[in-house]
Image (tube, coloured by chain):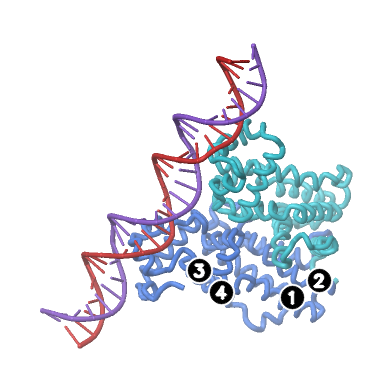
Chain colours: A cyan, B blue, C red, D purple
DNA sequence: AAGTCATATGACTCTATAGTCACATTATAA
DNA sequence: TTATAATGTGACTATAGAGTCATATGACTT
């Protein structure tokens, strides 16, 4: 948790520092991000940094928390009712929300993906808290309900499929990064195409029907 | 590429050093692996290390190359004929081979996964060379043939689906690591179950049939 | 104006690492 | 046995980053 001193800063200054952090983590990854570089880029003194945060992990956690908040706003448009509509319609909304976040915040998405694949489990747990499996737990619950409602295959391994769904959605960023130089130039149709391919895979498989 | 000096070492010594490297990268990831620690653990002098390798990247590339060789032996049992049999049978063989490698070399698999998700594209390219997309290119080719042979859905995006297949198979390691404390205790039936769930997903989807 | 509190500063210490190099040891050959 | 080449060694240098702290600045209060 950032210290009170940081929270008291003007919105402008907070944002300036946050953006420097994002660039640093995007450029160098979590392990190699340097506090010395960050303070230099942000134009603040080393000592000030330690008035704001306890250490790198503390700073990173703040960044991830802001990002989570932001991502939630992309999924907010999914109403309670829709959770009860059919599974694939819900999945479509979730995937579209995720891709819209990716489009608007590509760096953060990269930072997140990489951190999740990184080495130190202790750090990961410290930063993510119990939210580390939030996506899996959430999907598992939904899948379980749909399976009970006879909407999904009766021999489906719910836990495994929740994992696969999470992996697949996390891999979209990498896919687009491989295919396109500049993520901001990707058209909505291309995002939609990927969503539809994914939905179709989960709904019917890829075999000839 | 390791220097000739290293190649001249006895098989024993090479293996001892390789195992220390594996432990170090497993424990600390690529970025934080320390040459000083490696030489200490391996009981060789710092200077010797630099007679063997140019630097960390050179050493890592050697380790990855050995690993690739090893992994190939797990897929070797797939005959040329089988590439012409049906797609899902081939996929089953590939997935089983991958999981057997995971079972026998869990640390290497972790190291590989993490490195692929890590930050520095330049380092990644240096280490992986053009093999970085070997799996994708290979799968794309197969998918393309099967689609042409009318075995797969006619509106399938081959490139995207190759990416998804790669992601899914790479995510198996993480799945098992989350589910089980000790990977060596996982039974063959559990691996088979995961393979069958995956095949079924790609063949028919997860919807009620 | 004087006093008090929050915030800002950057030189400094401490630690860890990569990479070097002059010298020592061991193997090979003549 | 002596000479030459290959391999091994670890103290040393250079560098970079984390985190500290005594001091300075400014803002607000009485």
Q: Chain of mark 1?
A: B
Density class for disc 4 (Cα within 10 Å; few <14, some 14-19, many ≥20) is few
For the residues carrying marks 4 and 2, which lies nearer the camera in this image? 2
Quarter in which the N terminus of chain A is drawn? top right
Mark 2–mark 1 Cα distance, whole angstroms, equals 9 Å
Within-10-Å neighbours for mark 1: few <14, some 14–19, many 20+: many
Relative placement, left or right, of A145 versus A29 is right
Picture coordinates of residue A87, whole percent (x, y):
84, 53
Circles 2 and 1: CB atoms closer than 8 Å: yes
The secondary structure type at the circle numbered 3 is helix
Disc 4 and disc 2 in contact, CB within 8 angstroms: no
Secondary structure beneath dot 1 equals helix
Q: Earlier in the sequence, mark 3 or mark 1?
A: 3
Residue at mark 4 to residue at mark 1: CA–CA distance = 20 Å
Q: CA distance from mark 4 to mark 2?
A: 28 Å
Q: Which mark is residue B72?
A: 4
The residue that label 1 is drawn on is B143
Residue B61: assigned label: 3
């Amino acid at each position: 948790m950032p210290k009170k001193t940081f929270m008291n800063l003007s919105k402008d200054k907070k944002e300036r520092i946050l953006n420097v952090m994002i660039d640093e983590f995007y450029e160098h990854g979590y392990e190699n991000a340097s506090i010395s570089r960050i303070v230099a880029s942000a134009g603040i003194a080393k000592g000030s940094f330690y008035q704001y945060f306890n250490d790198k992990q503390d700073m990173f956690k703040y960044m991830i928390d802001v990002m989570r908040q932001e991502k939630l706003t992309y999924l907010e448009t999914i109403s309670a009712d829709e959770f009860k509509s059919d599974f694939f319609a819900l999945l479509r909304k979730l995937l579209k929300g995720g891709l819209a976040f990716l489009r608007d915040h590509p760096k953060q998405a990269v930072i997140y993906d990489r951190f999740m694949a990184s080495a130190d489990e202790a750090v990961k747990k410290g930063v993510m808290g119990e939210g580390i499996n939030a996506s899996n737990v959430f999907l598992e619950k939904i899948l379980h309900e749909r399976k009970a409602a006879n909407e999904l295959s009766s021999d489906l391994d719910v836990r495994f499929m929740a994992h696969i769904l999470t992996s697949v959605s996390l891999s979209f960023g990498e896919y687009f990064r491989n295919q396109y130089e500049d993520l901001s130039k990707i058209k909505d149709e291309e995002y939609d195409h990927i969503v539809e391919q994914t939905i179709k895979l989960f709904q019917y498989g890829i075999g000839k029907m």
